[in-house]
Image: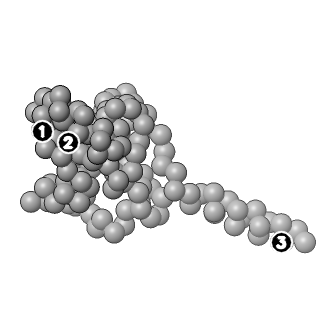
Amino acid sequence: MIKNIITSIFFFGIILGCSRTPKLLEYGSEGCHYCKMTIVDKQHAAQFMTKKGRTYAFDATECMLNHLKEIDPETVDLFLVNDYNDPGNMIDATMATFLISRNIPSPMGEYLSAFATEEAAKKVQVEHGGELFSWTEINTRFNQ
């Protein structure tokens, strides 16, 4: 009986430890995994979580995209980016719409911002100009 309880607690712990919940970014004290700059910008930060549950934080989406050139993207389980219109709120990068606009600086100078919806991105594009990209398109652009 005791052995069954201990086994159940062990497996419950494993299940909780393998959740798809990324860690919260520690703005102002956490460093970017790619460029080592301190992450302070709540509109442009990004992170990904591997299938093993390890998270990597980046001060800008462009740092995450550049880092992806160095690893096997198949090892990543979840890509997250900050929603430009809702600073600090991480959204699924694969579902986001990206805007490159010279009128919206990002930490690493690529002028890249992410939006939760294409409609939101188009509204900002009307005001600031630039070009829209899907997740696939922005990955292709950074891999050239």
Q: Secondary structure at mark 1?
A: loop
The residue labelled by disc 2 is 99
- For the residues labelled 3 and 2, the Cα–Cα distance comes to 54 Å
For the point 9% across and 60% down, which residue is it? 144
Callouts 1 and 2 close, C-beta under 8 Å: yes
Sequence-wise, which precedes: disc 3 or disc 1?
3
Quadrant location of the N terminus in the rendered image? bottom right
Residue 114, picture quadrant: top left
Left or right for 25, reference 33: right
Looking at the picture, how far across and down is residue 129, in whole percent?
Answer: 12, 34
Left or right for 8, reference 118: right
Q: Classify mark 2: residues with Cα within 10 Å, few (<14), some (14-19) or many (20+).
A: many
Q: Disc 1 marks which amino acid?
A: Gly
Between 37 and 111, the one lying in front of the other is 111
The residue labelled by disc 3 is 4
Q: Disc 2 marks which amino acid?
A: Leu
The residue labelled by disc 1 is 130
